[in-house]
Amino acid sequence: MLKEFQEFISKGNVMDLAVGVIIGAAFGKIVTSLVDDIIMPFIGALGGVDFSNYFIGLSHNVTATNLVDARKQGAVFAYGSFVTQVINFLIMAFIIFLMVKAVNSLRKRLEREKPAAPAAPPPADVQLLTEIRDLLAKR
């Protein structure tokens, strides 16, 4: 069983997946910082909107005006956090779209610049028949 596990772990697909998950987590943190620290403050400054503190208290004990304190007082319906996460997702999806588009464009450009592979020589019998034809055509 241990040997089977070692074979499974050493396969390229598993390692590729592990690398992808780690890079994805790091990329997620970058996008979260981009949204939370750069984009959302501009949206808040332009429209006077701060989605993070939009909530509805689900009990009479919730009297706080900010989400952190409201959560300490009781259950809250924090729809502003959801809106922020949806915006994060849309921004991340757009960034990934731009990255995939750039990589595809680069691949197409590299394929256009790559010299065409020379044609494979014809089989020996076809080549012999071609030579015979050419000799007869010269007569």
Image (tube, rainbow, N blue to C red):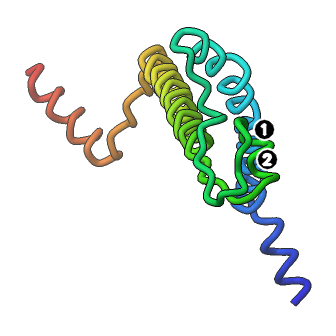
The residue that mark 2 highlights is: 22
Residue at 83 percent across and 65 percent down: it is: 10
What is the three-letter code of the residue carrying label 2?
Ile
Q: Quadrant of the C terminus?
A: top left
- Identify which residue, 99 or 2, lies in the foreground: 99
What is the three-letter code of the residue carrying label 1?
Ala
> Pointer 1: residues within 10 angstroms few (<14), some, or many (20+)?
few
Residue at 89 percent across and 83 percent down: it is: 3
From the viewer's perspective, is 80 left or right of 29?
A: left
- The secondary structure type at the circle numbered 2 is helix
- Identify which residue, 46 or 112, lies in the foreground: 46
Work out which residue is located at the far bottom of the displayed protein and give it: 1
> Splitting the image into 4 quarters, where does residue 2 fall?
bottom right
From the viewer's perspective, is 139 left or right of 97?
A: left
Number of numbered labels in the structure image: 2
From the viewer's perspective, is 137 left or right of 48?
A: left
Q: Position of residue 38 (x, y in %)?
A: 69, 16
- Identify which residue, 111 or 137, lies in the foreground: 111
The residue that mark 1 highlights is: 26
Residue 48: mark: none
Q: Position of residue 79 (x, y in %)?
A: 55, 45
Residue at 24 percent across and 32 percent down: it is: 131
- Identify which residue, 21 or 9, lies in the foreground: 21
Q: Quadrant of the N terminus?
A: bottom right
- The secondary structure type at the circle numbered 1 is helix
> Pointer 2: residues within 10 angstroms few (<14), some, or many (20+)?
few
Q: Is residue 108 above or below residue 10?
A: above
Label 2 and label 1: CA atoms lie apart by 6 Å
From the viewer's perspective, is 109 left or right of 80?
A: left
Asked whether the beta carbons under mark 2 and mark 1 sit within 8 Å of each other, the answer is: yes
Q: Position of residue 78 (x, y in %)?
A: 61, 48
Q: Position of residue 81 (x, y in %)?
A: 62, 42
